[in-house]
Image (cartoon, helix red, strand yellow):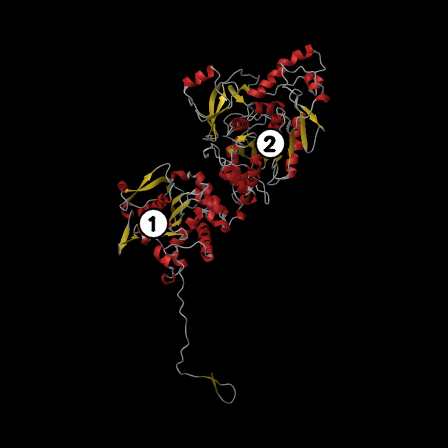
Amino acid sequence: MYEQTLYKVLPDYIKPKILKRMNRYNKWEYGYNDDHDMIVISKTGQIGEVYEIQNLKIALPLANNVYKFEEKRWTRFDYPKVLSRIKTVFDWREYPDDFKETWYDYIDLEFKRREEGFWYINKDKPIFITGTHYMYLQWSKIDVGQPDFRESNRLFFIFWEACRADDRCYGMCYLKNRRSGFSFMASGETVNMATMSTDARFGILSKSGADAKKMFTDKVVPISVNYPFFFKPIQDGMDRPKTELAYRVPASKFTRRSIVSTEKQEDLTGLDTTIDWKNTGDNAYDGEKLRLLVHDESGKWERPNDIQNNWRVTKTTLRLGSRIIGKCMMGSTSNALDKGGRNFKKLYDDSDVTKRNANGQTRSGLYSLFIPMEWNYEGYIDSYGYPVFETPSEKVHGPHGTPITIGVIEYWENEVEGLKEDQDGLNEFYRQFPRTTKHAFRDESKMSLFNLTKIYQQIDYNEEATSASVVTRGNFQWERGVKDTRVIFSPNKQGRFYITWTPPMNLQNRFIIKNGIKYPGNEHMGAFGCDSYDISGTVDGRGSNGSLHGLTKFSMENAPADHFFLEYIARPQTAETFFEDVLMACVFYGMPILAENNKPRLLYHFRRRGYRGFSINRPDKLYGKLSITEREIGGIPNSSQDIIQAHAAAIETYIENAVGFDGENYGDVYFQRTLEDWAQFDITRRTKFDASISSGLAIMACNKSRYAPVNRIKKQPVDIGIKKYDNKGLLSKIIK
């Protein structure tokens, strides 16, 4: 049974007494509400339901004046023909007052819906759409004519309204599927905001200048042209410009109270409200001030253009000092990571609303939103605009009467099944129509050092097999808090360790003492690899993680062979906490560790505590060839090219032999973060891949005999007094 996770309604999020009192006096203010950590998008002073969309809590208006269409679904209101003939406000003023009086209420109501949003009955349930969404549905013209109502778009516009309302936010970073309608929705919002603004600039960027121009000429301009006269300001220049749309905004809002004016068109001065586009580049719009910046296809910017660099520049166009004066609407599918996708992924990850600085802002300033493909896939939306997730038991039709016989989940799974022999095709399908963010950021197999086909086979298998049931999270601790006694494992949903196997009780905490030094008692069973760090904190608070992996060998003990049983990727508040975590894991399993010695504090920690015997010496050198430091603490350097190549080769071999589908069975690597790190591994930037470093060292530690140097003895010729003769010719000659 499919369970959607895109949003949820939070019942009783606000205490009923508080909600009732505040609603009675219309006390809810539009914007961020610090008391309840939510964003109010109501402009009536009253709120109803509280939604949570991607961890963002949003308070909707209280239901009021709920409209009921005849078919209980969205139906575009007919535009009165007599009004459709009026092209400008100046034409309107030529009509007699009694005619205008007839239409004042109609025009006022449209402005009210634009400002406050619109409630209507959809499939027997009252639903709310924002004013922006109403303008998109009622007054925007797209390539297929009029847009249909879609529940996914409703949630998108609610989230966008929250971004607009929150004065801590610079806008949204929207990770989408192909053909989601983002370009049209962004174009509609551009025109909607521009026609309400004075002295404002609106900008458009895309993956290329040609794409930005096309969005401007094919989407923005037609929507503007088809606005009714009472929403549309006087426009400078051509009706369908190619580079810039400039408005002359009437001096006051067009309502019953202010519509009467004696101003003539020629007397109006341009108020410099413009919409334009720029060629793609890091410095596009640098030095300007924007009310709205639309970033289309942000995940497809390829070198030399960098979406992150551009955002650092354009972000400044949306603020005056610390005050945010404009917003960015950014949306895209993702290219392969090496084709712009990695930069967009970084920007998306930095827009996580759960990770904020002391000023309440995300790292990017944006808010991330991902809507899975099943919410917005053409052909699997019913006549009410709701997605058909599962295969229906009764007849279901789309908005244009087309029957829907299977659910979108089944359709998607069928497509995936048909592409399993074509990994690049499958990865492209995932990126275009993702159900998870991991799908959206899939890389191309030909761009990876390792076998991506096998890695993604394993990732997909883990997701289908619910690997979470195999993996246990928790922490290690000394029994009763006394160091250097017994280590115990405590399950904890917030724990730093992920494990899939623990040894039997008789094999736990096994060690041997020689000359006062402790050595692992289960070295024959497996080993650990570790990528450590030395400094507790960094200036930006974004240092790399410490990483630890445990891998078994083949043994006669009761243990799975060649199995990654432990994953640790974390950066505790202090480096000492990390060191102790690693030490406890080694003691609990009774296995040695191979760690990089260029960051030696971890290894010195082991030595000081009497566990030098747990630290493996570099396997590629004889003991007599080790440096003084290497003899003292063990470990292996990360600078040697031989080691770097051997490390990558170790991972490559392991993936070929133990990961993915071998024709009969799947591998048993259940750590998704590690698999994803392997998928993205770049040997030229290897220090950024913590999980790959530690897992590769674990593989090398379990196979250290492969890297042992050969002690070659130089052979010297020995003269035993026997001469060799050349018997050619009549006389033999001694060969010297």
Q: Tag 2: Cα neighbours inside 10 Å, few (<14), some, or many (≥20)?
A: many
Residue 76 in the image: x percent, y percent? 61, 21
Residue 98's tag is: none
Q: Amino acid at mark 1?
A: His
**Residue bearing the label numbered 1:** 605
Task: Describe residue 393's horizontal placement relative to residue 476 as left or right.
Answer: right
Task: Describe residue 674's horizontal placement relative to residue 291 as left or right.
Answer: left
Q: Using the image as rendered, state which of residue 414 and residue 182 is in the foreground.
A: 182
Residue 102 higher or lower than 208, as above or below: above
Q: Secondary structure at mark 1?
A: helix
Q: Amino acid at mark 2?
A: Leu
Query: Quarter of the image holding residue 634?
Result: bottom left
Q: Quadrant of the N terminus?
A: top left
Q: Secondary structure at mark 2?
A: loop
Q: Tag 1: Cα neighbours inside 10 Å, few (<14), some, or many (≥20)?
A: some
Q: What is the CA distance from the residue labelled 1 to the residue labelled 2?
A: 54 Å
**Residue bearing the label numbered 2:** 290
Residue 660 higher or lower than 44, as above or below: below
Query: Quarter of the image holding residue 210?
Result: top right
